[in-house]
Image (cartoon, rainbow, N blue to C red):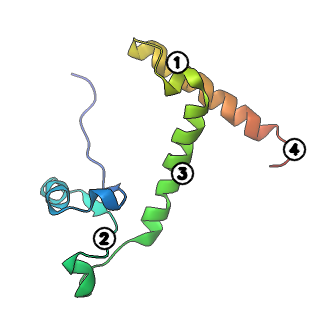
Amino acid sequence: MGRPRSRPESLAGDKAYSVRRVRQYLRERGIRPVIPHRENERAVRDGRVRFDSVAYRRRCVIEQCVGWLKECRRIGTRFDKLAVNFQGMVTLAMIGRYLKILFSDTA
C-alpha cells in the first residue's frame, strides 16, 4: 500500500530542459514548469512568456545541497549498493553539514 502518491506543484530546470516536449509532459500532469526559455525560442521574442524568477532562484538551494553531498566521496561515487545504506550515509553527511554550520565561527 504505502502512502498515496503526490505530484509537485512546479518543477525547476535549467535552459537545457527548455524544449516543447518537456513542457508539454509537465503540463499534461498538472505540473507548472519553471524553466527559462532559450534566447532563440519564439516564445521569448513575442513577449508572451511569464517566468517565475523567484521560484527559479530557490533552485540554487538544491544545487548547493547536492554540491555539499558530493564533498563526501562515499556519496558522490555511490559506494553503497543497498539503498538503506546509501540513505544512512546521506543522513550522516547532512547531520555533519548541519553541525559544521551550527558550530562554525563564521556563521
Task: Give the x, y percent position of residue 103.
Answer: 82, 37
Return the residue found at the far bottom: 46
Q: Position of residue 43 (x, y in %)?
A: 22, 79
Residue type for callout 1 = Gly
Foreground label between 2 and 3? 2
The front one of 50 and 5 is 50
Q: Quadrant of residue 19?
A: bottom left
Q: Which residue is mark 4?
A: 105
Amino acid type at circle 2 is Arg
Distance, label 1 to label 2, CA atoms, is 39 Å
- Residue 100 is tagged as none
Marks 1/3: CA–CA distance? 21 Å
Q: Quadrant of residue 52?
A: bottom left
Which disc is residue 61 wearing? 3
x and y percent of residue 45 in the render?
Answer: 25, 85
Mark 2 to mark 4 CA distance (whole Å): 42 Å
